[in-house]
Amino acid sequence: MSETEIIVKMDKHLKLKGGTYVRDLIRCEDCKYFDALNNDDHGWCKLISDLPIGVSVRYHDDYCSYAEER
């Protein structure tokens, strides 16, 4: 079985059991909106560049709630 990162909504802070599954976590490098730049550390988010929520340069292992798997 392969490892999967997930987002979990926790009932209480630091509670390890009893959370509710929300969705799989998608890293920027696996997102359809991510374009890798010429170096190995950063990329460009095509989606956030159109939104007023911040800088659109992202690391490959970043993630956000707008991510969609390729």
Image: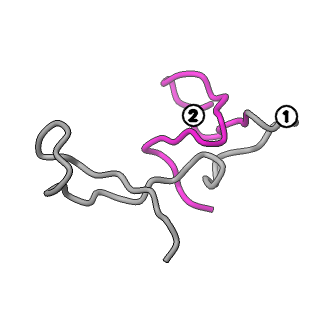
Quadrant (top left, top right, bottom left, bottom right) of the C terminus: bottom right
Q: Is residue 32 left or right of residue 64?
A: right
Magenta segment: 42-70
Determine the residue positioned at 20% across, 58% down: 20
Mark 1 and mark 2 lie on one chain; the one further toward the N terminus is 1
Farthest residue in the bottom direction? 1
Determine the residue positioned at 39% across, 56% down: 6
Residue 48 image label: 2
Q: Please provide percent x and percent y for residue 19.
A: 18, 55
Determine the residue positioned at 20% across, 39% down: 14
Quarter of the figure with residue 15: top left
Q: Is residue 16 left or right of residue 46?
A: left
Q: Amino acid at mark 2?
A: Ile
Residue that carries the numbered disc 1 in the rendered image: 39
Within 10 Å of disc 2 (Cα), the crowding (few <14, some 14-19, many 20+) is some
Magenta: predominant secondary structure element? loop
Rounded to the nearest whole Å, what is the CA distance between mark 1 and mark 2? 20 Å
